[in-house]
Image (cartoon, helix red, strand yellow):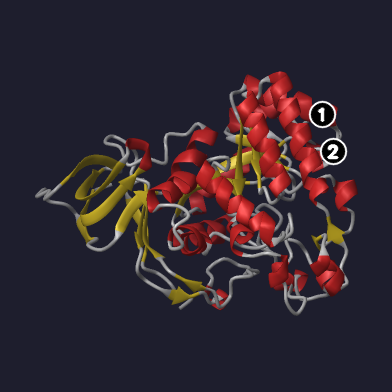
Amino acid sequence: MGSLLIKNSRIIDPANKVDKIADMYISDGIIEEISENIEKQADRVINAEGLCTLPGFVDLNTHLKEPGGEKHETIATGTLAAAIGGYTTVCAMPDTEPVTDNEIVVTYVKYKAEKEATVNVIPVGALTKGLEGDELADIGRMAQAGAGAFSEGIKSVKNASQMKIALNYSKMFGLPVLSICEDSQLAGKGSVNAGDNASLLGLKGISHDAEEIMVARDTILADSVKAQLHICSVSTKGSIDLIRFAKQKGVNVTCDIDPHHIALCDEDIKDYDANFKMRPPLRSKEDVECLKAALKEGVVDVIATAHTPVHADNKNCEFENASDGVVGLETSFAVCYTELVDKGILTLSELAEKMSLNPSKVLHIDKGTLGIGKTADITIIDPNEEYTVNTVGFVGKSNNSPFNGYNAKARVKYTIVNGKTVMEDRHDNR
């Protein structure tokens, strides 16, 4: 695999409490040395003066859509987008066609990833067959085939009894359940956050309780069976309060939020642009401020992308009829740096912890660190390069993002996976 020497970079490794200017030497995909003025010969030298070297980002909530949804995204295009955004590992959610609810589809995703992926891919198995919520999927066989977690994709398991059984089974295999919390009956046909803005737009709203009642249910069930629960895409103040309470009680629960839920609120929806339609919806300013405070407090453990590509045909229609979802792999770091680090809410080390170390802990994988002897999954960023997001230049197959025209304060320059540079200052969206 060869050797790589990164010179004069600010190395930030929250796992080992490292934040210093130094060189890094990598050989055969493994970090061998971090010190000043390394003089070893290397096949490749990167002069990273003025840049920051971080553990590669790990995303818990990526919808790659393959098999079956290649109109929207493929494993090849989605993982290339991940590399552009600094991600070295992504979790492929199970909302595929056929659904990833058996060992055959898990094996297929792994095979395609080995052949075509730019970054590491961890298949996520469905909790119920067909994501229908009625019959438990074969969790054991999927775990044996290589599933790294289980989820009901973009929705909650409808039946509480099935959810409790699923949590119990996942515990047997030492794997987390990644839960999107929404009561479909309470959410109904809503398309935006319930509130004044929904009334002004003339659109049906989704109330906070549609999310919060499922957060309460799932944390209670996780406590009951002592299973590991991770709640994805938290968006309301009430959910944060419930998760804080569950943690204080000793429940094995973690959670993540999405970059769009800390950068935007429901008042930002203009001209019925369906690129602002997502699940959960953009919430109120009060919710946004609460999410930011919860990140700093540590109640929120992870920032995930909720990358959900949607073909233009499924967005270019009436807002209420458009498909939910936004892409996030290519913009998440830039948005988070701009909204959190540049504004003094998190340090860069704390952001790396939320995007690298903590998601690795949730998955029980040996990633998210730049320790000696560890695999060289690395993201190098420029904290001073400002640019304007142009979604036309996205490398993924879909560009359904609310951040077109967004002024970002930092940029990913290199992405290194298993010691190999897979992305080098490649940005067409200037």
Task: Where is residue 239? Give x, y as percent.
Answer: 71, 43
Q: Nearer the viewer, residue 360 or 394?
A: 360
Task: Using a 10 Å C-alpha cutoff, classify the residue at mark 2 as few (fewer than 14 neighbours), some (14 to 19) or many (20 or more).
Answer: some
Q: Is residue 146 visible?
A: yes
Q: Quadrant of residue 252?
A: top right
Instruction: Give amino acid for label 1.
Output: Gln
Q: Nearer the viewer, residue 395 or 276?
A: 276
Point out which mark residue 162 bears: 1
* Residue drawn 74% across the image and 41% down it: 152
- Report whether 375 appears left or right of 36: right
* Residue drawn 49% across the image and 60% down it: 80
Q: Quadrant of residue 107?
A: top right
Task: Where is residue 319? Give x, y as percent.
Answer: 81, 71
Task: Using a 10 Å C-alpha cutoff, classify the residue at mark 1 as few (fewer than 14 neighbours), some (14 to 19) or many (20 or more).
Answer: some
Q: Which residue is mark 2?
A: 158
Q: Nearer the viewer, residue 105 or 423?
A: 423
- Report whether 423 appears left or right of 219: left
Quarter of the image where the C terminus is located: bottom left
Instruction: Give amino acid for label 2.
Output: Lys
Residue ranking furthest to the left:
39
Q: Are marks 1 and 2 in contact (CB under 8 Å)?
A: yes
Task: Where is residue 203? Give x, y as percent.
Answer: 86, 68
* Residue drawn 75% across the image and 61% down it: 324
Task: Where is residue 378? Give x, y as percent.
Answer: 36, 50
Q: Quadrant of residue 14?
A: top left
- Report whether 191 appears left or right of 329: right
Identify the element where label 1 is drawn.
helix
- Say above or below: 59 vs 170: below
